[in-house]
């Protein structure tokens, strides 16, 4: 089973030195999406969200296989609304 590494680039860079074994690239993408969604939730709870934060997935040789940004992790719907007077 291949080993994938998930390097996080947000307010702090965190390089994954251990990785995890997953069945294939599709499973690695799902893992990256789940992690990105968790980070998005944490950021929103802190009152900010940077859509350019990302997770880079690499293989055992260090080759980059994919990048999942916070922007990729969710679908934003609705329209921006003008501020209402208080």
Image (spheres, rainbow, N blue to C red):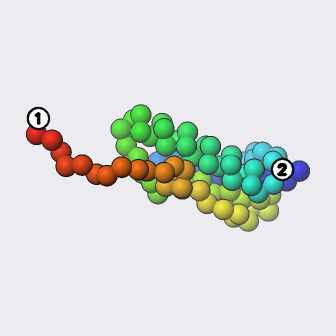
* Image location (x, y in percent) of residue 69: 54, 56
Q: Is residue 32 left or right of residue 80?
A: right
- For image coordinates 79% across by 62% down, the residue present is 61
Q: Which mark is residue 86?
A: 1
Sequence-earlier tag: 1 or 2: 2
Few, some or many C-alpha atoms within 10 Å of disc 2 (few <14, some 14-19, many ≥20)? few
Q: Which mark is residue 56?
A: none
In the rendered image, which residue does mark 2 sit on? 23
* Image location (x, y in percent) of residue 47: 36, 38
- For image coordinates 47% across by 48% down, the residue present is 11
* Image location (x, y in percent) of residue 81: 24, 49
Q: Is residue 36 left or right of residue 49?
A: right
Few, some or many C-alpha atoms within 10 Å of disc 1 (few <14, some 14-19, many ≥20)? few
Secondary structure beneath disc 2?
loop
Instruction: Choose between 48 and 8: the one closer to the eye.
Output: 48
* Image location (x, y in percent) of residue 39: 53, 41
Q: Which quarter of the rendered picture does the C terminus lie within?
A: top left
For the residues bearing labels 1 and 2, Cβ distance under 8 angstroms: no
Q: Gap between marks 1 and 2, in whole Å?
A: 54 Å
Is residue 75 visible to us here?
yes
- For image coordinates 73% across by 51% down, the residue present is 28
> In the current view of this chain or complex, which residue is farthest to the front?
78
């Amino acid at each position: 089973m291949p080993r994938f590494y998930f390097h996080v680039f947000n307010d702090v860079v965190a390089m994954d030195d251990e990785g995890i074994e997953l069945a294939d690239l599709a499973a690695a993408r799902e893992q990256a999406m789940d992690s990105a969604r968790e980070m998005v939730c944490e950021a929103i709870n802190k009152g900010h969200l940077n859509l350019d934060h990302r997770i880079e997935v690499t293989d055992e040789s260090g080759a980059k296989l994919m990048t999942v940004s916070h922007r990729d992790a969710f679908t934003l719907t609705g329209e921006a609304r003008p501020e209402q007077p208080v």
